């Protein structure tokens, strides 16, 4: 087991089994041994690759969609241009470069990052040195908010429950023979899960992300009060269905309970939970469709003109990965938040 696993086993021996959310929180963000605390996991040499690391086109088109939302809202003079979990800062850097030509936009914006990992904050500062950093979304300024989140919510800890005789048994982490093991609590009714009694049956697993409602609620509140828009991308669907917890190390799936703190842990995002915490939101739209509507193919053709050989081949492959239904195009979805009575962000429908 890892050093973090030993710490967790000692804690469990003293105070009893912990929820999956507590386990994930320690694995990802433990101040000494957490996965994001100790490394930059992105890219070919890391454990996984994200859309902005695949191609500059992703951040460029998102930046332009949000700049259009700013124009649609009569160009407020002082705005927050924010990102939740910005990774290496690549998406924001691409969004800023693409929007340089939007008159007045850069003069109006201040960049804010919500990021807990000191390692990644340092990376972000290399690409976007003038950003302001926050530990969580609650301290974002009281101002119009134009916000991006890509693969942020899938990194937030989840709880899992199995339905049993009209109640729910929570998936808990205990210790058996020195190893961390998954067990189930006694079945109990849970008011907060009553709405899932209609679309599940005994034996079904559902997932809940406890931190999500407060974060989305706060972002939506700022947008409702001051104006703005949010684009939230992730893999997942309308309502959680089944066990989607997965661990990745070196671009390969691994057991989530064997090397705590050394593998990335994620779960699919429940877009219905985002909608429930927001006020005005768009349809959930496949990423490929969103990017096509914003003109990714025309942009890809323009960029292709300057490329030859391997660079051209990888550019064509990047376009396919971002948009094709067999790659990220369908698995990844986007939902937009915008002010009541306003115009939805470009690329999305009410
Ligand atoms: C999967 S990476 C995505 C990075 C980036 N958005 C991209 O698309 O390349 C998740 C990001 O969220 C950050 N993160 C994870 N949990 C967080 C939390 N609870 N609060 C703030 N940032 C968090 C990570 O440090 C990392 O920057």
Image (cartoon, rainbow, N blue to C red):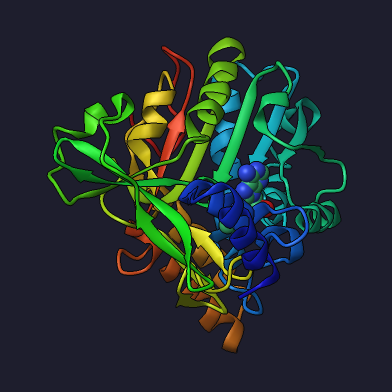
Relative to 57, residue 209 above or below:
above
Coordinates of residue 150 in the picture (x, y in percent): 54, 49
Asked if residue 37 lies left or right of residue 321, the reply is right
Residue occupying image coordinates x 45% and y 50%: 234
Q: Is residue 238 visible?
A: no
Q: 224 and 46: which one is in front?
A: 46
Relative to 98, residue 227 above or below:
above
Q: Quadrant of the C terminus?
A: top left
Q: Is residue 86 visible?
A: yes
Asked which quadrant contains residue 189, the reply is top left
Q: Quadrant of the N terminus?
A: bottom right
Coordinates of residue 329 in the picture (x, y in percent): 37, 59
Coordinates of residue 249 in the picture (x, y in percent): 55, 75
Residue occupying image coordinates x 48% and y 23%: 338
Q: Residue furthest front?
A: 14
Relative to 190, residue 209 above or below:
below
Q: Residue furthest bottom?
A: 309
Coordinates of residue 195 in the picture (x, y in percent): 23, 28
């Amino acid at each position: 087991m890892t050093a973090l696993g030993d710490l967790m086993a000692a804690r469990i021996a003293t105070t009893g089994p912990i929820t999956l959310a507590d386990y994930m929180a320690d694995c990802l963000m433990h101040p000494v041994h957490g996965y994001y605390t100790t490394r930059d996991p992105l890219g070919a040499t890391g454990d996984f690759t994200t859309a902005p690391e695949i191609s500059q086109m992703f951040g460029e088109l998102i930046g332009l969609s949000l700049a259009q939302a700013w124009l649609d809202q009569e160009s407020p003079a002082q705005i927050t241009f924010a990102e939740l979990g910005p990774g290496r800062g690549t998406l924001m850097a691409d969004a800023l470069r693409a929007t340089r030509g939007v008159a007045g936009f850069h003069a109006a914006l201040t960049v804010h990052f919500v990021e807990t990992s000191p390692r990644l904050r340092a990376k972000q500062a290399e690409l976007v040195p003038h950003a302001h950093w926050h530990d969580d979304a609650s301290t974002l300024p009281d101002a119009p908010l134009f916000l991006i989140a890509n693969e942020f919510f899938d990194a937030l800890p989840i709880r899992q429950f199995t339905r049993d005789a009209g109640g729910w048994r929570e998936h808990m982490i205990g210790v058996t023979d020195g190893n961390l093991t998954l067990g189930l609590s006694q079945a109990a009714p849970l008011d907060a899960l009553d709405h899932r009694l209609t679309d599940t049956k005994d034996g079904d697993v559902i997932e809940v992300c406890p931190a999500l409602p407060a974060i989305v609620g706060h972002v939506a509140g700022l947008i409702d009060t001051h104006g703005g828009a949010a684009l939230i991308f992730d893999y997942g669907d309308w309502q959680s269905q089944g066990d989607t917890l997965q661990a990745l190390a070196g671009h390969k799936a691994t057991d989530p309970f064997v090397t705590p703190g050394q593998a990335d842990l994620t779960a699919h995002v429940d877009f219905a939970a985002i909608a429930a915490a927001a006020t005005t939101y768009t349809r959930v739209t496949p990423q490929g469709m969103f990017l096509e509507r914003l003109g990714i193919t025309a942009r890809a053709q323009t960029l292709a003109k300057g490329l030859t050989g391997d660079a051209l081949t990888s550019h064509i492959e990047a376009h396919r990965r971002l948009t094709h239904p067999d790659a990220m195009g369908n698995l990844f979805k986007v939902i937009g938040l915008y002010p009541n009575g306003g115009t939805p962000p470009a690329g999305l429908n009410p």
